[in-house]
Amino acid sequence: MTADEAKREAALKALELVQPGMTLGLGTGSTAAHFVRGLGLRLKAGLRIAGAVATSEATADLARASGVPLLEPGPETRFDLAVDGADEIDPALNLIKGGGGALLREKIVAAAAARFIVIADAGKRTPRLGRFPLPVEVTPFAWPLTAAKVAEALRAAGCARDVLSLRYKDGAPFITDGGNHILDCQAALIPEPSALAALLDATPGVVEHGLFIGLAHEAIVV
Ligand code: 5RP
């Protein structure tokens, strides 16, 4: 089975959890895209849901093309089920996310979900987080200053490395859906993910980071 076939199978298993009337959170990336396309097929076959919120403009476009009704989140919005991919999953279901640059909206949706399910191919499992470069979303303003503080945080949290690079796309700094930049942080090993998360949360200029600690309820890994 290829990694993409495994991603699709994980997405199809998550689809079995969708019940009529649910409000859904839709993740971003190639695995989440399988879920959105599969959801579209189930809707065409007669399933009715309250609606869904997409975690990126790319997912919103795919949802619209697949016939998935989209909602604007309000103060009372709670997701019965949010389904998203991940870049790394540790045994405690702590995650690194944001490889696709959508970590901010992904975390907002995951934090508002009664049930947040991660779907992935087996290559995403790891005994310890950190091999995948940790995405950190930062304001464009003074980003080099913020990058120095982020490197300090990596060192203070005992990470094995503290090498940061500004993400580029098509020859220019990558811009997130929120208008920010991404620092990809090569930590090699993050010994205490929650300690690093707390330091990053306290760093001015950091809008959000890709450590999802204690948010995932289940992982469907194929
Ligand atoms: C996007 C993400 C993705 O869920 C993550 O990068 C996994 O992507 P894929 O499903 O394509 O392997 O966090 O910001």
Image (cartoon, rainbow, N blue to C red):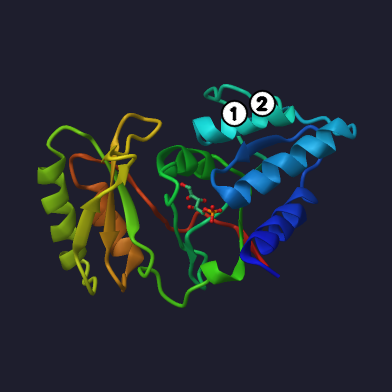
Residue 54, visible in the rendered structure: no
Question: How far, Cα to Cα, is label 2 from label 1?
Answer: 5 Å
Q: Nearer the viewer, residue 129 or 50?
A: 129
Q: Residue at x 69, y 46 (%)?
A: 35
Disc 1 marks a residue whose amino acid type is Asp
Residue 17: % across, % down: 77, 50
**Image quarter in which the N terminus is found:** bottom right
SS for tag 1? helix
**Image quarter in which the C terminus is found:** bottom right
According to the picture, the residue beneath numbered tag 2 turns out to be: 64
Residue 162 vs residue 70: left or right? Answer: left
> Is label 1 within 8 A of ligand 1 (CB to nearest ligand atom)?
no
Q: Tell me where residue 181 sits by quadrant.
A: top left
Mark 2 touching mark 1, by CB under 8 A?
Answer: yes
Residue 185, visible in the rendered structure: yes
According to the picture, the residue beneath numbered tag 1 turns out to be: 61
